[in-house]
Amino acid sequence: MPDLIVHLKEYRTRCGLTQAELARQVGVSRKTVNTVENGVFIPSTPLALRLAQVLGVSVEDLFALPEPES
């Protein structure tokens, strides 16, 4: 499976939230938010949807697949 491009940190900081604050709002640990931001953990669909909802963006804004190489 290809790596994801993760923009979670960018949108979280734009909203003025710490990892702990975002984690509390979506019901996960701060460590989970950290591992998602660093691309170590790919979130489940429900978690990705909750993150997008709290940050006021689409899932596609937070996560993308890299462009295929020609």
Image (tube, rainbow, N blue to C red):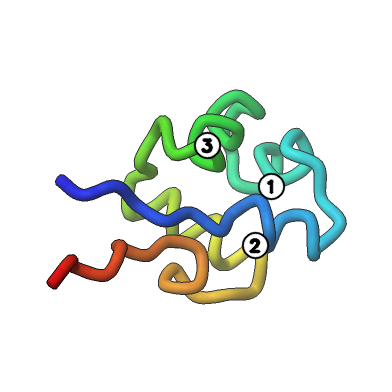
Question: Can you say which quadrant of the picture contains the C terminus?
Answer: bottom left
The correct choice, above or below, for 6 with respect to 58 in the image is above
Question: Residue 14: x, y in percent?
Answer: 79, 64
The answer to whether the residue labelled 2 contacts the one labelled 1, judged by CB atoms less than 8 Å apart, is yes
Give the image quarter of residue 27: top right
Which amino acid, by three-letter code, is at mark 2?
Val
Residue ID for mark 2: 54
The correct choice, above or below, for 56 with respect to 40 in the image is below
Question: Residue 8: x, y in percent?
Answer: 59, 54
Q: Residues within 10 Å of mark 3 (few under 14, many from 20)?
A: some
The correct choice, above or below, for 49 with respect to 41 in the image is below
CA distance separating discs 2 and 1: 7 Å
Q: Nearer the viewer, mark 3 or mark 2?
A: 3
Q: Residues within 10 Å of mark 2 (few under 14, many from 20)?
A: few
The local secondary structure at tag 1 comes to: helix
Residue ID for mark 1: 25
Q: Earlier in the sequence, mark 3 or mark 2?
A: 3
Left or right of 65 on screen, residue 33 = right
The answer to whether the residue labelled 1 contacts the one labelled 3, judged by CB atoms less than 8 Å apart, is no
Q: Nearer the viewer, mark 1 or mark 3?
A: 3
CA distance separating discs 1 and 3: 19 Å
Which amino acid, by three-letter code, is at mark 3?
Asn
Residue ID for mark 3: 38
Q: Which mark is residue 58?
A: none
The local secondary structure at tag 2 comes to: helix
Q: Earlier in the sequence, mark 1 or mark 3?
A: 1
Give the image quarter of residue 44: top left
